[in-house]
Image (spheres, rainbow, N blue to C red):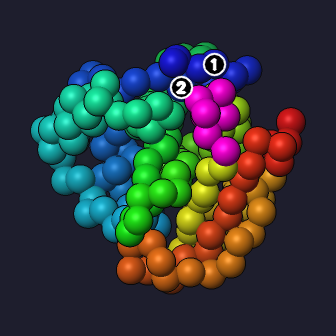
Amino acid sequence: MPLATDRLLIRDWSADDAEAALAIYGSADVTRWLTPAMHRVEDVAGMRSVLQAWQEAQPNLLKPRGRWAVQLREGGEVVGGLSIRLLPPYEEDLEVSWQLDRRAWGHGYATEAARALIAWAFTQDVDELFAVARPANRRAIATAERLGMQWVGETSKYYDLTLQAYRIRQGDLSG
């Protein structure tokens, strides 16, 4: 880390990102789709506390786990977040997830950023990654499919929610 694509920089979060992060994690349009369910962050101070917790946890996580900011290379605006974390309940499966500011939807940023993160994760001794989405979250499902992820099925194994599960293995990663 950091990772760079043609348009994006994937880097650690900083406290200076609180306002941009609030546009993501303070938006009901974003948080209603998150798994696990996450309450909308109410204000910049609250967001700064969340970012601080993420920053403190990051060095203690085994690679490729973590949380990162997605920043536009041109202009430097933070437009999203990415994470890789263990899925419950058995904490065997790794989940890749993406969250974007509502204003950044429809530009291909989620696919571009997640593709770079997945490619990096496969250099870290990982065989497969999963993505889970609520059945009505067509944007997340379409992104998983654009990434070359294969539909595994519907499950209620994770987060006590009925979710669509997708998996990608290193050989599945599409350019």
Q: Is residue 154 above or below residue 144?
A: below
**150 relative to 19 in the view: left or right:** right
- Give x and y (percent) for residue 163: 55, 77
Q: Is residue 50 above or below residue 18?
A: below
Distance from disc 2 to disc 1, alpha carbons, whole Å, reads 6 Å
Q: Amino acid at mark 1?
A: Ala
**Circles 2 and 1: CB distance less than 8 Å?**
yes
Q: Quadrant of residue 107?
A: top right
Q: In the image shown, does 74 or 90 lie closer to the viewer?
A: 90
Q: Quadrant of residue 68?
A: top left
Q: Amino acid at mark 2?
A: Ile
- Give x and y (percent) for residue 9: 57, 21
The secondary element bearing badge 2 is classed as: strand
- Check disc 2: other Cα within 10 Å, few if <14, some if 14-19, many if 20+: many
Q: Say which residue appears at 67% left-offset and 64% top-offset.
A: 166
- Give x and y (percent) for residue 91: 41, 58
- The residue beneath circle 1 is 4
Q: Say which residue appears at 83% left-offset and 48% top-offset.
A: 172
Asked if the stretch drawn in magenta spans residue 131, the answer is no
**32 relative to 102 in the view: left or right:** left
Q: Say which residue appears at 40% left-offset and 33% top-offset.
A: 62
**161 relative to 175 in the view: left or right:** left
- Give x and y (percent) for residue 162: 50, 83
> Which of the image's four quarters has the C terminus?
top right
- The residue beneath circle 2 is 10
First-in-chain label (2 vs 1)? 1
Magenta highlight range: 121-127
